[in-house]
Image (cartoon, rainbow, N blue to C red):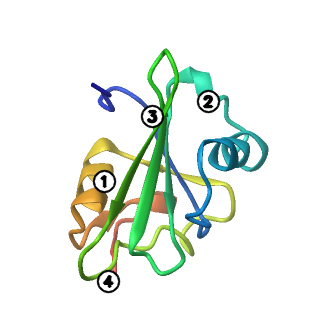
């Protein structure tokens, strides 16, 4: 079982090619976001159309990718609120994002209602 509670959550602040797997997403984390995968942080990537999200996490023994594709609607946008790199998400924001709800993201220090 993968536990996300108690870990820092970072979301890439620009769209991601969802064809990327372990190697491609790991390279984005290291080169673009400047993080070390084995620290146990959680990394969220979203497709340009905002219908698919991938979550990359190190569980202590290896990497796992969790993927969700919405049957209808779109996820709240993560980009356009933070300049490059990654946005920090709270666990509540991650949960609401993955539920597909109209989440209020606090990216960039201000609370905004996401337009879905």
Secondary structure under tag 2 reads helix
Query: Where 103 falls versus 43 (above or below)?
Result: below
What distance separates the C-alpha of mark 3 from that of mark 2?
A: 12 Å
What distance separates the C-alpha of mark 4 from that of mark 3?
A: 25 Å
Q: Are marks 1 and 2 in contact (CB under 8 Å)?
A: no
Residue at image x 55%, y 64%? 18
Secondary structure under tag 1 reads helix
Point out the tag, 2 or 4, that comes first from the N-terminus.
2
Secondary structure under tag 3 reads loop
Residue named by callout 4: 116
Image coordinates for residue 1, horizontal then vertical, percent: 27, 25
Q: Are marks 3 and 2 in contact (CB under 8 Å)?
A: no
Point out the tag, 3 or 2, that comes first from the N-terminus.
3
Q: Are marks 4 and 3 in contact (CB under 8 Å)?
A: no
Q: Nearer the viewer, mark 1 or mark 2?
A: 2
47 relative position to 69: left or right: right
* Crowd rating for badge 2 (residues with CA inside 10 Å; few <14, some 14–19, many 20+): some
Residue named by callout 2: 37
Residue named by callout 1: 93
Which numbered tag is attached to residue 59?
Answer: none
Point out the tag, 1 or 4, that comes first from the N-terminus.
1
What distance separates the C-alpha of mark 1 from that of mark 2?
A: 21 Å
What distance separates the C-alpha of mark 1 from that of mark 4?
A: 15 Å
* Crowd rating for badge 4 (residues with CA inside 10 Å; few <14, some 14–19, many 20+): few
Q: Nearer the viewer, mark 3 or mark 2?
A: 2
Q: Are marks 3 and 1 in contact (CB under 8 Å)?
A: no
């Amino acid at each position: 079982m993968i536990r996300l509670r108690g870990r820092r959550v970072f979301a890439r602040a620009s769209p991601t090619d969802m064809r990327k797997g372990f190697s491609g997403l790991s390279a984005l984390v290291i080169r673009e976001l400047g993080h070390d995968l084995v620290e146990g942080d959680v990394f969220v990537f979203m497709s340009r159309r905002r219908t698919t999200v991938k979550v990359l996490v190190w569980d202590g023994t290896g990497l796992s990718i969790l993927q969700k594709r919405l049957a209808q609607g779109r996820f709240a946008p993560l980009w356009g609120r933070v300049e490059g790199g990654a946005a920090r998400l709270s666990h509540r924001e991650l949960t609401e994002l993955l539920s597909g709800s109209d989440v209020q993201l606090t990216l960039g220090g201000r609370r905004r209602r996401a337009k879905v």
